[in-house]
Image: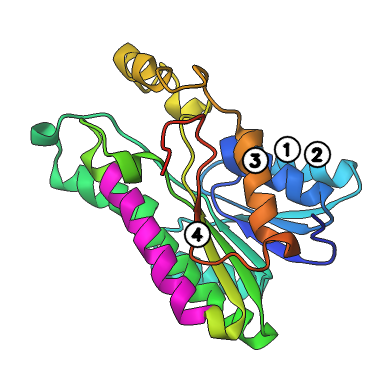
Amino acid sequence: MSLQGRTTLITGAATGIGRATALLFAQAGARVVINHWRQSAEAQALVDQIRAAGGEALAAEADVSNAGAVQAMAEQIGPVDVLVNNAGIIQEKSFLETTEADWDRMLGVDLKAVFLVCRAFIPGMLDKGQGAIVNIASDLGILGRERYAPYCAAKAGVIGLTKSLAREFAPQQIRVNAIAPGPVATAMVSLEHMSAEWVEKELAIPQHRLGAPEDIAATALFLASDLSGFYTGQVLGPNGGSVMP
């Protein structure tokens, strides 16, 4: 699963799933652009780690929910061969307590950003005559979950957007796929941010464990590589059995 000589952009890559994906892509030979927002120290540490291992990496700070910031980042780094839309946030809150600001913020980072980043980087892929896009959704975009309405709506939207783009750009050899992970052990889904009831429910999946960021990164590498050349519009689910289509 080589990415030798390919430029890859991973959004929200300073920590968690994005960080694991950046490390794995660098090991596969990619030049990795690590997008982050207000995580300069973490992003630079990751860049240094990749470079120390002989890889190529650079950090690009941008709020991917802001159209101007995304366009500026695209102009800064130029065309990419592989795009991983990973940046995301989550919030546990009852539906009736959810404010319009909560909704706008969640949809902005988890769905609108995917639209903005794809819109900025697909033209470069069209010029190259090929490309691979991997969008990180969630099993909750399929299952739904009480107290997570904006998050579930956003991730379901990512799945729908993925399929639409896959159909539109398949003739130009741009493959667009999604990953819908189950529960993954990251800081974003820790007890610091989630209730004990949430964690108990997540552990009720058939494998009775949380996934590791590396589990998701491995799926991203497959979808970015030539081994998945006949995959487009697909939603792969490293989820420990939470969803069995």
Q: Which of marks 4 and 2 is nearer the N terminus?
A: 2
Identity of the amino acid at label 1?
A: Ala
Task: Please tell me whether mark 1 sits on a helix, a strand or a loop.
Answer: helix
Identity of the amino acid at label 2?
A: Gln
In the image, 32 versus 76, the foreground residue is 32
Task: Please tell me whether mark 3 sits on a helix, a strand or a loop.
Answer: helix
**Point 41% across, 44% down: residue:** 245
Residue for badge 4: 234
* Front position among marks 2 and 3: 3
Asked whether the residues under the numbered discs 1 and 2 touch, taking CB atoms below 8 Å apart as contact, a structural biologist would say yes
Q: Does the magenta stretch include residue 159?
A: yes
Residue for badge 3: 19
CA gap, disc 1 and disc 2: 6 Å
Residue for badge 1: 45
**Point 43% across, 38% down: residue:** 244
Q: Which of marks 4 and 3 is nearer the N terminus?
A: 3
Asked whether the residues under the numbered discs 3 and 1 touch, taking CB atoms below 8 Å apart as contact, a structural biologist would say no
CA gap, disc 4 and disc 3: 23 Å
CA gap, disc 4 and disc 2: 32 Å
Asked whether the residues under the numbered discs 4 and 2 touch, taking CB atoms below 8 Å apart as contact, a structural biologist would say no
* Front position among marks 3 and 1: 3
Q: Earlier in the sequence, mark 2 or mark 3?
A: 3
Identity of the amino acid at label 4?
A: Gln
**Point 66% across, 69% down: residue:** 77
Q: Give the range drawn in magenta.
A: 152-169
Residue for badge 2: 49
In the image, 125 versus 109, the foreground residue is 125
Q: Where is residue 174 in the image (x, y as percent from the top left)?
A: 59, 76
Q: Is residue 149 above or below residue 189?
A: below
Q: Is residue 207 visible?
A: yes
Q: Earlier in the sequence, mark 3 or mark 1?
A: 3
CA gap, disc 2 and disc 3: 11 Å
